[in-house]
């Protein structure tokens, strides 16, 4: 759904200081100076480490007309509850190693493109997913996907490191994860029906097709729909990861034999042993999912508003 909004005049820019090898601070301030030059009122602020810190500032942030994030998908994820609560329009300048959210909507660091989006003043209504379950307080948001497999083992290793994250960090941690690769054993239910019963393999629950976009691991997932898609690759092996890497470099679809199921509510029971999960590129809660845990994935009823550009191709 497209929504027309008043032209944003008061803009808050939030940047993640450790994204993009620490270059986001300078980028955020250059962007702020550009907007001020074009008559906008701008405040530049560093991102918070915890979601609850943003929720304490709902009334303060609601005073702005637009939120511009300079950072990656993890930064956006922490802001999702605030954005759905306030209906504050969002624009993302890619500042992470992936920045899947920004690239999905054709967003970039190009200031003229942002200016065109401001002039158009039109938003797209988009939904996001939430995760709840054993040992999880409340509902934890995600926009792109959650997964268990080689990627979550890699992200777990990355999550242990401190400071800015580079492409080399991903490569090194990925090689380490590949050497010790194993997959979880799970039971998956979609809208109350068991679709995977105590099988081992790679799992991805997606709200968007953006993850590994060239590979099209979950091509039917879309934040414009009020449902999620779960993909399962039974008996996943190391050579599957090599295939994905090869096709990713060639920018082609991998055509792996994933099984797909879609629905409004997805349940995942993890059997022994415990296993890490990655959510939008972050090691989920910085701890593994305990064996015997039941996770619930669903769509948040309140959408967010994404400021779009004239050339947008809706996902």
Image (spheres, helix red, strand yellow):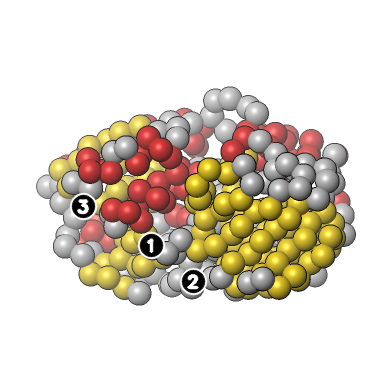
Q: Are marks 2 and 3 in contact (CB under 8 Å)?
A: no
Pick whichever of labels 3 and 1 is earlier in the sequence.
Answer: 3
Judged left or right of residue 215, residue 43 is: left
Q: Is residue 14 above or below residue 251?
A: above
The secondary structure type at the circle numbered 2 is loop
At numbered mark 1, what does the secondary structure look like: helix, strand or loop? Answer: loop
Is 125 situated above or below 112?
below
Q: Which residue is mark 1?
A: 302
| Residue nearest the viewer, comparing 243 with 199 | 199
Q: What residue is shown with label 3?
A: 65
Residue 165, given in percent of the width and then of the height, sits at 57, 33
Question: Quadrant of residue 283 in the image?
Answer: top right
- When asked about the image quadrant of residue 199, the answer is bottom right
Dot 3: within a 10 Å radius of its alpha carbon, few (fewer than 14), some, or many (20 or more) residues? Answer: some
* Badge 2: residue crowd in 10 Å (few <14, some 14–19, many ≥20): some
Alpha-carbon span between mark 1 and mark 2: 10 Å
The structure residue drawn at horizontal position 45% and vertical position 44%, both measured from the top left corner, is 78
Nearest the eye: 66 or 296: 296
Question: Which numbered marker is on residue 210?
Answer: none
Residue 149 in sight: no
Q: CA distance from mark 3 to mark 1?
A: 19 Å
Mark count: 3
Q: Earlier in the sequence, mark 2 or mark 3?
A: 3
Residue at 23% across, 48% down = 62
Classify the position of the N terminus by image quarter: bottom left
Q: CA distance from mark 2 to mark 3?
A: 26 Å
Q: Mark on residue 226?
A: 2
Q: Around disc 1, counting alpha carbons within 10 Å, would you say few (fewer than 14), some (14 to 19), or many (20 or more)?
A: some
Q: What residue is drawn where x is 68% and y is 53%?
A: 294
């Amino acid at each position: 759904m497209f929504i027309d909004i008043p032209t944003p005049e008061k803009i808050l820019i939030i940047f993640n200081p450790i994204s993009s090898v620490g270059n986001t601070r300078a980028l955020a301030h250059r962007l702020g100076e550009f907007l001020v030059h074009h008559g906008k009122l701008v405040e530049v602020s560093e991102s918070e480490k915890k979601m609850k810190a943003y929720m304490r500032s709902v009334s303060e942030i609601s005073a702005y007309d637009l939120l511009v994030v300079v950072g990656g998908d993890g930064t956006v994820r922490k802001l999702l509850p605030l954005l759905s609560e306030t209906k504050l329009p969002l624009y993302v300048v890619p500042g992470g190693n992936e920045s899947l959210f920004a690239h999905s909507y054709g967003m970039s660091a190009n200031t003229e493109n942002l200016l065109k989006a401001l002039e158009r003043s039109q938003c797209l209504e988009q939904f996001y997913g939430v995760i709840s379950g054993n040992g999880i307080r409340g509902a934890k948001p995600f926009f792109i996907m959650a997964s268990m497999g080689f990627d979550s083992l890699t992200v777990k290793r990355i999550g242990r490191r401190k400071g800015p994250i580079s492409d080399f960090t991903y490569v090194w941690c990925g090689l380490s994860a590949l050497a010790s690769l194993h997959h979880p054993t799970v039971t998956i239910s979609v809208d109350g029906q068991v679709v995977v019963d105590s099988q081992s393999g790679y799992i991805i629950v997606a709200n968007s097709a953006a993850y590994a976009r060239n590979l099209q691991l979950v091509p039917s997932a879309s934040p414009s729909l009020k449902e999620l898609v779960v993909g399962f690759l039974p008996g996943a092996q190391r050579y599957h990861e090599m295939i994905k890497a090869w096709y990713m470099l060639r920018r082609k679809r991998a055509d792996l034999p994933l099984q797909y199921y879609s629905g409004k509510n997805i349940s995942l029971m993890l059997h022994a042993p415990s296993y890490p999960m990655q959510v939008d590129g972050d090691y989920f809660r910085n701890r593994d999912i305990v064996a015997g845990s039941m996770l619930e994935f669903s769509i948040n009823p309140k959408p967010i508003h994404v400021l779009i550009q004239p050339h947008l191709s809706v996902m």
